[in-house]
Amino acid sequence: MQAGKPILYSYFRSSCSWRVRIALALKGIDYETVPINLIKDGGQQLAIIEYLEETRPTPRLLPQDPKKRASVRMISDLIAGGIQPLQNLSVLKQVGEEFQLTWAQNAIISGFNALEQILQSTAGTYCVGDEVTMADLCLVPQVANAERFKVDCTPYPTISSINKRLLVLEAFQVTHPCRQPDTPTELRA
């Protein structure tokens, strides 16, 4: 039994919200956005994406092959649990204003060093093979954060080329933070 449209409580710049928006767009799920002003990014987006995968299995965001599925989960966890939380506003406030940029850059660079090595063995067109997966939903918002924190991505050719291929896909374009209802006018596309 399905009730009305799902509601996504979202903040335009939230990496977590963006991941879920991409999943909803890829699966063709119409939803209502309720903008919220986040002080701290949420951490349940992977559980939401897995729920969507279980209840609406097409298109697949987790490969059928167990080894590839494990790779998708590993990459997703590395990004959503190991890199992105270190740039949350609540963490950056603890670091102090004068150290925020350096802190965020170091966290991203450390994570991207590990991620680049992993992707060199798992990537095809996208993070794991040639189909868009949950790992790709995690990658694009994280690369956007890297750009926001002025991280040089040239040492990460695999990350950069996958991100470039993903950004041309409609689901990634329509869910971009610059196209959300709560995006400030000066940041709109």
Image (spheres, rainbow, N blue to C red):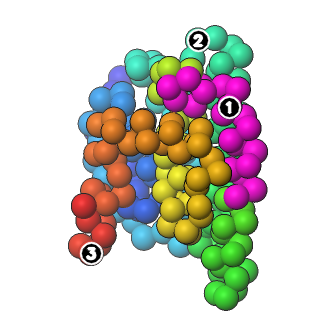
The residue at 48%/21% (across/down) is 131
Range drawn in magenta: 109-128
Side of 150 relative to 71 (left or right): left
* Distance of label 3 from label 2 (alpha carbons): 42 Å
Q: Which mark is residue 120?
A: 1
Q: Which residue is denoted by mark 2 in the rendering?
A: 64
Number of marks: 3
Q: Quadrant of the C terminus?
A: bottom left
Q: Which mark is residue 186?
A: 3
Q: Residues within 10 Å of mark 3 (few under 14, many from 20)?
A: few
Q: Amino acid at mark 2?
A: Gln
Residue 146 point in image, percent of width and height = 56, 60
Residue 60 point in image, percent of width and height = 47, 20
Question: Residue 152 in magenta?
Answer: no
Side of 113 relative to 47 (left or right): right
The residue at 67%/59% (across/down) is 108
Residue 14 point in image, percent of width and height = 47, 59
Q: Residues within 10 Å of mark 1 (few under 14, many from 20)?
A: some
Q: Main SS of the magenta segment?
A: helix
Residue that sits furthest to the top in the current view: 65
* Distance of label 3 from label 1 (alpha carbons): 37 Å
Q: Quadrant of residue 73?
A: top right
Q: Which SS class for mark 2?
A: loop
Q: Which SS class for mark 1?
A: helix
Question: Where 131 sits versus 31, above or below?
Answer: above
